[in-house]
Amino acid sequence: MTHSEKIAVVIRTKNEAKWLRSCLFAVSNQDYPAVEIVVVDNESSDGSREIAAGFGCVIVDIPDRDFNFSRALNRGIEATDAPLLAILSGHCVPANEQWLARLAMNMREENVAAVYGRQEPLPDSSSIDKRDLWTTFGLDRKEQKRDYFFHNANSMIRRSIWEKIPFNEEIHGVEDRDWAKKVLNGSNKIVYEPGASVFHHHGIHHDGSLERADRVVKVIELIQKDLT
Amino acid sequence: MKIWTANNLPEHGKTPSLDFGVWSDGESSAEILQTFRTGEPVPAAGTCLLAPGQSLAPDLLSALRDGDRDIYAPVNGLAEEGMAMLRDSIGPGRLILTFDFAAGAVDLAYFEQLAWLSHQPERFAVMTDLADAMLPAALAGAAAILIEDAAGIDFSALDRVAAQRLSERARPIAPAETEALAGREACLTVSRPLRAGEIIDTGDLAVAVTEYRGLSPALKDAVAGRTLRYDIAPGEALHFGHIL
């Protein structure tokens, strides 16, 4: 990989106006030179779409009737030809201008299929979210060959692998771990890169939402049994 | 990496990283390379060497375009016009920009030449008998080294460099980078306490070494004029999460 290889940043949004401007300001000020931003918007009514247009993003609309998390990502990736694809939530804000380069530097190894970065809380994140983020996303880089934990709020994948294994549109959420388990086939690895950090206000457990936890657990149980 | 050299190199032949090639069975490398410097195009060992100052007549260009040989073209011999004609006719796939370093010195000008070559769309080669010049060329990504007289050259260092290139391993981290990677490089902070909702003025910005890796001082102009989402104190790293 060269430093001029194009990277597309694919961002999913649904009423993310509160964070999207900060997110896009950060993405637009990365020190990586070749960046295309694709925003996949799911019927936002709070001005998210207009914010994205103001930053010159490619906008892909996905209506409610077609939406699931996997499909939104697949449609966004189809809208670009970039060989490296960073995936970012519209409410996540890269910490500094090195975020994208820190993700990409791990892709110089051919057998790195994907990278995911650190997620940090903000000052007004709940204590539950702070605890969970600090516990989950540590300070040491990790290379995973069997552990399929992977998180699309802040990640990068290789297009050549996605073309063979797109995100599973049959499941609703947790598409990242489902994809990672399929990709880790013995020769590939997934890297956790703490230097590529984003702020994620409500964390990965959505302030302890039991409904969400139930949904996540059901999908993970299927993934564990290779039933997805 | 290809090493074009003298007719017989039984002590080297081929290593996992270096592929030694012989220009032809009948002539020595020295003769061929002298021809390269002074004469007409030389077809040799499945390649074609263009001479500096070569007249690129239409029939020659057609022959080069229609052939399947790699074409070694002198970057410090062909005029810009000639190079443009070659690029238009051949394309980057078979064209190898060749830098004749016969009488040069390994100095800044040489490194600048390598930097330029490494950023061209074509592959590049360096013609030299100096082992000290071969290593930087290999590090810069040369596709080939052209050697007149390989006698006495120890290729082991070149082999190691080429092996590292082929391995595609992530580069090792230099000691000088360690501090930066640990988040201890200078970044933007503020010169006075600022509250959420305040607009950042250029005069409010300062640079400090902080535990947390915030924004580069190079972003000072981009950040000035933006509104703060959270309070920030002097000495605290300013990051994108602070900014609305």
Image (cartoon, coloured by chain):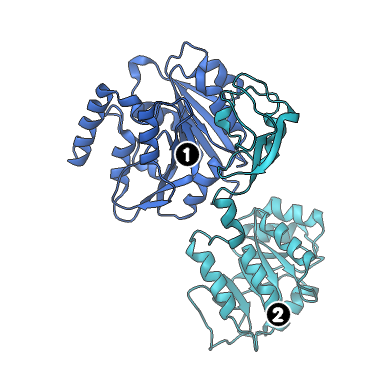
The type of residue carrying mark 2 is Asp
Residue A228 seen in this snapshot: no
Which SS class for mark 2?
loop
Horizontal side of B160 relative to B88 (left or right) equals left
Tell me the crowding category of disc 2: few under 14, some 14 to 19, or many 20 or more residues within 10 angstroms, Cα based.
Answer: many
* Chain (blue): A
Residue A179 visible in the current orientation: yes
Q: Quadrant of residue B215?
A: top right
Q: Amino acid at mark 1?
A: Leu
Residue at numbered disc 2: B129
Where does residue B220 sit, x and y in percent of width and height?
70, 34
Q: Residues within 10 Å of mark 1 (few under 14, many from 20)?
A: many
Q: Which mark is residue B223?
A: none
Which quadrant of the figure contains the C terminus of chain A? top left
Q: Position of residue A186 (x, y in %)?
A: 29, 55
Whether marks 1 and 2 lie on the same chain: no
Q: Residue at image x 48%, y 28%?
A: A123
Label 1, label 2: how far apart the Cα atoms are: 44 Å
Position of A87 with respect to A180 (left or right) is right
Q: Which mark is residue A85?
A: 1
Q: Colour of chain B?
A: cyan
Whether residue A13 sits left or right of residue B90 in the image: it is left
Q: Residue at x 34, y 19 (%)?
A: A66
